[in-house]
Image (cartoon, rainbow, N blue to C red):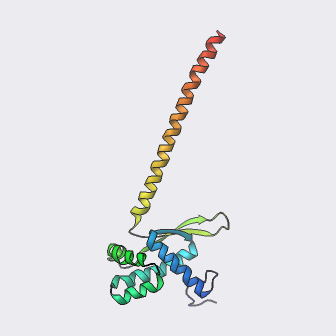
């Protein structure tokens, strides 16, 4: 029995698991939202929230602790300059995991992990895609209307020739 055994092994060695979690956290802080498997998302959530909590102190020691996990200096700068001021007043729960369903190839459960207060990034992207779809649908309707108008005179001509 696995009483009091925390964490997921993710089918990796300890060093590989540490590197995977570190890169997932880096991507999460860089892009504000990532798509991954449910197990990786749940495992990343705890580490990311602990890093953000450490970063809320803002002193040199906490910065160095964060830099042990996040190797990208630009992401660390962004964490301390943009992310922490925006979500620093929260008492926890900085991330959200949303289940997506199963992946086609291997039926792995997929999920999106995102920073809670950064929904406008995803909303803006979704809005742009929606506008593209609507524009494409309008173009399609216009082309269909033109085709219908072309067919009507042809039908009238064929009816008149029959008379």
Q: Residue at (50%, 69%) from the top-left corner?
A: 34
Q: Position of residue 53 (x, y in %)?
A: 39, 82
Q: Tell me how many marks there are.
A: 0
- Please state which of residues 18 and 39 is positioned toward the viewer in this rendering: 18
Vertical placement of residue 12 versus 139, above or below: below
Seen as rendered, the residue at the extreme right is: 106
Image quarter of residue 100: bottom right
Does any portion of residue 93 appear in the rendered image? no
Image quarter of residue 65: bottom left
Seen as rendered, the residue at the extreme front is: 73
Does any portion of residue 135 appear in the rendered image? yes
Q: Position of residue 39 (x, y in %)?
A: 57, 76
Vertical placement of residue 93 versus 121, above or below: below
Q: Position of residue 14 (x, y in %)?
A: 59, 87
- Please state which of residues 132 and 162 is positioned toward the viewer in this rendering: 132
Vertical placement of residue 79 versus 146, above or below: below
Q: Residue at (64%, 81%) from the top-left corner?
A: 11
The quarter of the image holding the C terminus is top right
Q: On the picture, is 107 further left or further right than 79? A: right
Q: Position of residue 152 (x, y in %)?
A: 57, 22
Q: Residue at (52%, 76%) from the top-left corner?
A: 24
Q: Residue at (35%, 73%) from the top-left corner?
A: 82
The quarter of the image holding the N terminus is bottom right
């Amino acid at each position: 029995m696995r009483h009091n055994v925390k964490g997921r092994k993710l089918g990796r060695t300890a060093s590989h698991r540490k590197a995977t979690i570190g890169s997932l956290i880096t991507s999460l802080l860089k892009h504000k939202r990532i798509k991954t498997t449910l197990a990786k998302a749940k495992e990343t959530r705890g580490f990311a929230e602990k890093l953000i909590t450490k970063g809320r102190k803002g002193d040199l020691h906490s910065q160095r602790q964060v830099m042990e996990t996040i190797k990208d200096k630009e992401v660390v700068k962004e964490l301390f300059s943009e992310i922490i001021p925006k979500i620093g007043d929260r008492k926890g729960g900085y991330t959200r995991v949303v289940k997506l369903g199963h992946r086609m190839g291997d039926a792995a459960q997929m999920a999106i992990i995102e920073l809670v207060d950064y929904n406008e990034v995803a909303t803006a992207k979704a809005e742009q895609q929606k506008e593209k779809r609507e524009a494409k649908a309008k173009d399609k309707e216009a082309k269909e209307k033109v085709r219908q108008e072309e067919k009507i005179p042809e039908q009238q001509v064929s009816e008149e020739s029959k008379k």
